[in-house]
Image (tube, rainbow, N blue to C red):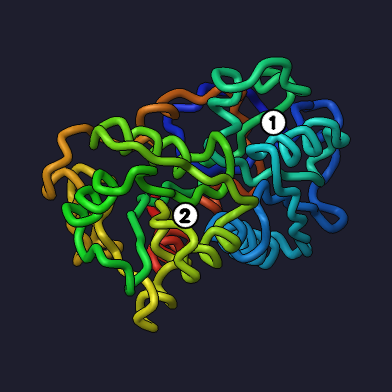
Amino acid sequence: MNLNRRHLLGAAAAGLALPWSTASMAQAWPRRPIRMVSPYGAGGSSDILTRVLADFLGRKLGQSIVVENKAGAGTRIANDYVAKAPPDGYTLLHAAAPIAIGEALYKDLPYDVHKSFAAIAGTAIAPLFLIANADAPYKSFAEFIKYAKGNPKGATFGSPGAGSAPHLTAELLLRAADMKGVVVQYRGDAPAYTDLLGRRIDATLTAISTAIPHIQAGKLRVLGVALEERTPLYPDAPTLREQGLAEDLAVNRVFIKESVFPFLKFPGADILLGPEMKSTGEVMGVSE
């Protein structure tokens, strides 16, 4: 197998990366089980996508892929763990947005994002939906804004981690809507949902896949989607823009236009970018 560096022409909010080295990858791969690291806790949208990818790619490669959750510190724990792993192709990182923007947010990262990783393939962009408890007094985005501005403390948003796309989108929303608020950081989507269902926070911005069961059960409500146009993934959700918000909140596109990684021609990349995986992603509420 010959691995060559090449420019990453497109980028996504989530993607696979591995410790960077070509020399140690010269032999046949894979000859033993692979480890895929998720930077968020179990049960959230990123973790679910990681497990779907691991199962799908493992079946195609004929080798088991074990998912390990290394949540916390805005994905830096997982990133550092993979950066320090042997560069032999048997430790993969299902990277999230914070890995690409960490340098702008944190000083003294324990790894060099430009040298420690090599990208394999972009996997998905998950549109962010503004979700609230179905029993909350606001039933629309406009009512949510009115509620937040009438509350001395503003609105509370749940985020799966500092530096994540939901975190940054919530901060942009607070600024764009000219309202006060606090973004509460959790270790993944699942604990944020627990507090949202218990009405300990007012809203969260999240992928639709993990919210659907709660929406169908009548426990959560979609207030809108942070895109310029409605998405076929959930066409009933109006955009925040069509509900009066002028600013574009699509941080996935704003922050990740260019890759910070060298890009590898890696066995399995074509599988992940193929039509079968694309159709699987659409079912989960993500897109290319």
Reply above or below: 112 against 187: above
Instruction: Give the camera-side residue of 265 and 220.
Output: 220
Q: Residue furthest bottom?
A: 217
Which residue is drawn at the image coordinates 35% and 63% (left, top)? 132
Q: Residue furthest front?
A: 152
Of the residues shown, which amino acid type is indicated by label 1? Leu
Give the x, y percent position of residue 250: 32, 38
Which residue is drawn at the image coordinates 69% and 38% (left, top)? 73
Reply above or below: 21 against 81: above
SS of the residue at dot 1? Answer: loop
SS of the residue at dot 2? Answer: loop
Which residue is drawn at the image coordinates 74% and 54% (left, top)? 69
Instruction: Give the camera-side residue of 83 and 171.
Output: 171
Is residue 160 at least partly visible in the picture?
Answer: yes
Reply above or below: 104 against 39: above
Which residue is drawn at the image coordinates 40% and 35% (left, top)? 171
Give the x, y percent position of residue 101: 54, 25
Determine which of the numbered discs, if any, sits on residue 226 in the image. none
Is residue 17 at least partly visible in the picture?
Answer: no
Query: Which quadrant: the N terminus?
Result: top right
Instruction: Give the camera-side residue of 40 and 167.
Output: 167
Q: Mark 1 and mark 2 in contact (Cβ < 8 Å)?
A: no
Q: Which residue is mark 2?
A: 274
* Label 2 to label 1: alpha-carbon separation: 20 Å
Q: Say whether disc 2 or disc 1 marks the residue closer to the N-terminus.
A: 1
Badge 1 local density, few (<14 within 10 Å), some, or many (20+)?
Answer: some
Badge 2 local density, few (<14 within 10 Å), some, or many (20+)?
Answer: few
Determine which of the numbered discs, if any, sits on residue 3 in the image. 1
Of the residues shown, which amino acid type is indicated by label 2? Gly
Answer with the quarter of the image where residue 121 lies: top right
Give the x, y percent position of residue 173: 31, 38
